[in-house]
Image: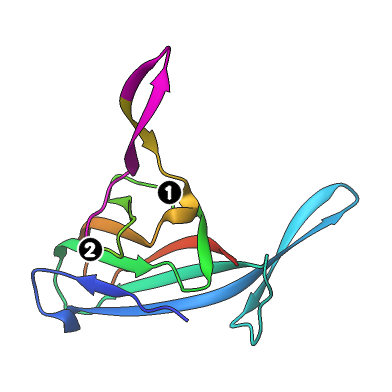
Amino acid sequence: MATASAQTGAVQQNVTFTLRQDLIKSVVTDGKATETVIENPKTVLPGDVLREQITLVNVSGRKLAQLLVNVPVPKGTEFAQLTTANANRWKAQYSLDGGKTFSAAPTRTVTVTENGQSVTRKVPVPTTEYTNVRWTVTNINPDETLKFAFRVKVK
């Protein structure tokens, strides 16, 4: 359903990149919520939650720096939740324009009327409008595997 890319200052074959899409089913039993993962579902329905999971493996034999992992939100879905939180070696950012620009907290400028005055301010953009998720990885060691994930909801 989706494509993803990893970019480095080095040649692309330095990293293997795998994108998986799994269906997440939530069930409440005796007041406890549990999740079941259905790998590579054949069909999904509106309202279903999917996990987009990216596996990155450094196959270069050397430490790589400044990797950009850019994953579009699949067509027919909307961004729901980041499940790989920021860490000291990577940070997530989001795009509203198909991956041209990114921000940690996208905003939009709006003009509203307050007390009869026109006021312009920046407001957060709803996460449902995100088109891409990108992690900036500061470094990845030889033979290291990193996994990143976010969830989307089927429209």
Q: Residue at x 15, y 66 (%)?
A: 64
Q: Residue at x 82, y 49 (%)?
A: 32
Q: To which residue does mark 2 refer?
A: 68
Q: Residue furthest right?
A: 30
Instruction: Tell me the amino acid under the disc marked 1.
Output: Ala
Instruction: Tell me the amino acid under the disc marked 2.
Output: Leu
Which comes sooner in the sequence, label 2 or label 1?
2
Residue 150 higher or lower than 39, as above or below: above
Residue 106, image x and y in percent? Answer: 33, 44
Q: Residue at x 22, y 61 (%)?
A: 100
- Where disc 1 sits, the SS reads loop
- Circle 1 residues within 10 Å: few <14, some 14–19, many ≥20: few
- Where disc 2 sits, the SS reads strand
Q: To which residue does mark 1 refer?
A: 85
Separation of residues labelled 2 and 1 (CA atoms)? 16 Å
Q: Residue furthest top?
A: 115
In this view of the protein, which residue sits in the foreground, 141 or 84? 84
Residue 119, image x and y in percent? Answer: 33, 22
Q: Quadrant of residue 123?
A: top left
Q: Residue at x 48, y 60 (%)?
A: 150
50 relative position to 112: left or right = right
Residue 102 higher or lower than 13, as above or below: above
Q: Residue furthest bottom?
A: 42
Residue 148, image x and y in percent? Answer: 41, 62
6 relative position to 18: left or right = left
Residue 124 higher or lower than 30, as above or below: above
Figure label count: 2
Magenta stretch bounds:
100-119
